[in-house]
Image (cartoon, rainbow, N blue to C red):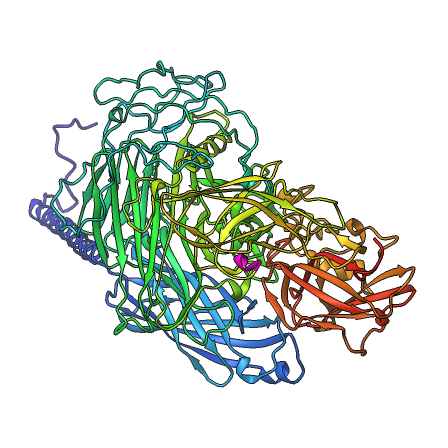
Amino acid sequence: MANSGQLPRPPAHGRYDFGNNEARRRKGNVIKFGCVALIAAVLIAFAIYGIFLLFSFKNAQVPRFQVKAVQVSKFDVANVLIAQQKVLSTDLVFNFESDNRNPMVRVGLENMVMETTWNEVEAHLGETHVENVVITSKGVSTLKVTAHGEVELSKKIVKKEDMKLDLVLSGDLKFFSGPFKTKTYPFMVSCNGISGDSSDAACDSKLFTNGESSPPPTQKAKAPSSPQAPLEKSTVEPSVVINQSQPKESLPPPPLASREMPAVEPPVAPSKEPMPREKPAVKDHPRPSLSKEPLPVPPQASAPGKLPDQPPLSSPPQAAPGKLPDQPPLSSPPKASIPAPAQQAQGKPPVVEDKPPPPSPPKDSFPPVKLNIQDKFVILSNGILAVTISKPAGYVTGIQYNGIENILDTVNPEDDRGYWDVVWAPPGTKGTKGNFQRIVAKDFRVIIERADQIELSFKLAYNPAVDTKKAAPMEIDQRYVMLQGVSGVYAYGIFERAAWAQFGMPNARLAFKLQRQQFKYMVVADNRQREMPVPEDRMKPRGQVLEYPEAVLLVDPIDPKLKGEVDDKYQYSMESQDIRVHGWICKDPPTGFWQITPSFEFRSGGPNKQFLTSHVGPSTLAMFVSAHYSGEELIPKFKEGEPWNHIYGPIFMYMNNQTKGADFKLLWEDAKQKMLAEVKSWPYSFPASEDFPKANERVNVTGRFFVYDKYVTNEKVPAKGSFIGLGPLGEAGSWQRDCKTYQFWTRTDDEGYFTINFVRVGNYDVHGWVDGYIGDFKHKSPVNIAVGRNVDLGELVFEPLRDGPTLWEIGIPDRLAKEFYIPDPNPKYVNKLYVNHPDRFRQYGLWERYAELYPNNDLVYDVNTSDYKKDWFYAQVTRQIGARYNGTTWQVKFNLEDVVPNGIYKLRIALASATNSDLEVRFNEPKPSPAIFTSGRIGNDNSIARHGIHGLYWLFNIDVKGNTLRKGNNTMFLTQTKGVSPFQGLMYDYIRLEGPATSPK
């Protein structure tokens, strides 16, 4: 065997060919080099292409995006007008146009939802499908969205011009800005007045794009989209913490003197330095930008179930520099009764103990309030929270508190988180409709800037030469106030108009929308609180819209425990007198957001006008003017040249928190205590506006209220627990339709005594009513309120309407239909909150139960044998026969032992609600005999659909001639003649037949 040093065996030709071997080696090297060079060239090309892609993606812009038109390809008018079908077949084609300026970018549409309104009546359109949803070419491209289905009508259409369809299409624009990166932006298209006469309809479209700092809407927000103020580290308690073993020590109330005015003595001015009046506008002055430090997080317990240490209550807690102190825990407040004005709550008002608030730490122990004015935002902070407001628009875009970088919903655009809005109606507008206007201020001013208080103004002026058809003819000044050491922010609005154009205002409010993934537990009362659905649960396919868009059946909610329930914002309405505090709770970290209203003097409609509160969003509303539960009669309408000034608020947005692991419901208990402190501080001393009178500019009114009905008692008796108040000049009962002025109400004590505190200067009528008695009280002469002079009205005696003795009666005269029979809901449409609940009338679909209980004939009631609690349905509703709705006739049977042929009997019918109704009354002869009374078309409060047990109060006093009645058996026929929708009808409060005045008792 050859060793390694030997040459290999020579080839057959006898010699070695070293030259050819070298050539082959060189050739192989060339091939290898070529392959390497080719691979390198390919890699370089890919790198260059990648850099180009990255540059393109980085600089990719959202394409211009708008809807060009909506084409109506099928509109079956004849079937609706002639055959009166309830179903209208239609196809709608939306043509979107997008100018895509980057060939590397694709655009698509998804998650589209459509809501429709048919002729001012809610309707439902079938499912949508999408074609050609992706744009890949550069230039102008079209996306076509076809919506097809059947519009279900809930209203009879009689004229071709009534065939108008309004719709809103919403969805997401998906923006493919990279190989693995997409952004999603919500869009909305609104179209009004689509008819069968036109093939195209004009529409408005909007794409909601957030700034660079905003997260995509489909992702959970980790940071606010607008600047937030980091709070200074200090020795202040950031909020409240609750401990079962310690006495209550809440955050201090605003730096005001909590006070209760004496009954007769003049009000005493607050013992603090006078508040400066409004000062001229100031220029934006440079301020250092806030640092990027995070908001201080309240200290957590060192171990599960262990609360932080509590320092002595006699002095504010101290901490090392740069470290927050441990917070003193608070005990759970005991329950007692709420002050008298809120005792009449439907669904129980908050139950709280009326006791003085705990002593407040010295103001110097809290950091000063600071203002940071930036280019597009202003930031208020006081060491507890930071509030960011857009400048000059006045939108609240962020609230930083308790370690939550933004309590407000960052999925929404910045103008849809905290804002004021109105609905205003130009002349000729019918019903409660109008133009929606979100208030966008044009002028920003600093009104007060001190260490203990900052007040800001965001004002929208009105120019009649420019804004006549664009905006409501009035000026709106939005005010926000932050105080030293107070865990929240105050807001009020100054609404003012000069001699400007005629208009109406169906709605005015302040709304806040919270983080939807964190605030899921809602509280409006002690017995009205629950886990709520999220907005996605209300959308297809998770939710199914019922008779109107606000009511949705939860078919496949994210939380399976909610499956099969109905969600409807009207199920959480409350009377104005009881809307003192409501809001939302986040369980992790335990945080509460509460809207506190210390007075309802500025709201429309008096103490028992119903308003929305909080609902799925999560949204919390401060309603000031609303046509809900009242209709057009409670829309403030201003004549040409009519001046007006009104302040709505202040209200208080209060925030509190807890240590982790504690009972989160104690946040509600603390919020009720805070509400009491705010009520006792009313009227606030801090608002800078001269239009808001302070305590020493108001007056107390006292007196004693009696009731005397000669057919019930022999003498006047104290009207205990009754409403007594000062309202506008007018007829008895006119206060409930007042929506331009201020009203001041209280409840009498057991002896009939009352004190109405802190009344504004002006002329008023004294109004009142007494449960158990029919009608309204009005004092014989107006009352003039002047500064420095309290008013004692002495004894007031209410003599209810009465001609003769009671022959029979149905119900209780309390302005409610609550005592009558309220059925269980259809098992398919249950809100579990109201099962076995005193407010069971708030269940959805109760109107449908009438036809199930009375399938063939209408209700018949015998005053001798029937029980109104079981046999009188709570509402006289329509009956559906085929595709039509018809009015109904109820019978009341009664027996008279004797009749005075020449006498005049009196029938008194008190209604708790009326919706597009006409009541006819007959005795002993049904239709077609002439009615002895016809109400005419009355009411539009829609309380049947909106789960109210009352709307506006109506009282009819009807003369009945004796020769109309018979000795022995008689029948009264009550016919509600109107029949167009399932929501028309009446709710009765009380019915009484009186004998002639000459009759024996």
Across and down, in percent, residue 750 comes to 62, 36
Q: Quadrant of residue 890?
A: bottom right
Q: Is residue 866 left or right of residue 180?
A: right
Across and down, in percent, residue 580 comes to 48, 42
Q: Nearer the viewer, residue 120 or 889?
A: 889
Across and down, in percent, residue 894 comes to 87, 60
> Could you tell me what secondary structure mostly forms the magenta stretch?
helix
In this view of the protein, can residue 377 be seen by the observer?
A: yes
- The vertical placement of 195 against 912, above or below, is below
- The vertical placement of 173 against 131, above or below, is above
Q: Quarter of the image containing the N terminus?
A: top left
- The vertical placement of 459 against 971, above or below, is above
**Residue depicted at x 16% and y 41%:** 289
Q: Is residue 270 left or right of residue 561?
A: left
Q: Is residue 614 left or right of residue 409?
A: right
Q: Is residue 407 left or right of residue 688?
A: right
Total marks placed: 0
Q: Nearer the viewer, residue 976 or 659?
A: 976
Decide whether residue 735 is among the magenta residues: yes
Across and down, in percent, residue 779 comes to 55, 53
**Residue depicted at x 24% and y 27%:** 233
Q: Residue furthest left?
A: 19
Decide whether residue 917 is among the magenta residues: no
| Stretch in magenta | 732-736
Q: Nearer the viewer, residue 499 or 961?
A: 961
In this view of the protein, can residue 885 be seen by the observer?
A: no
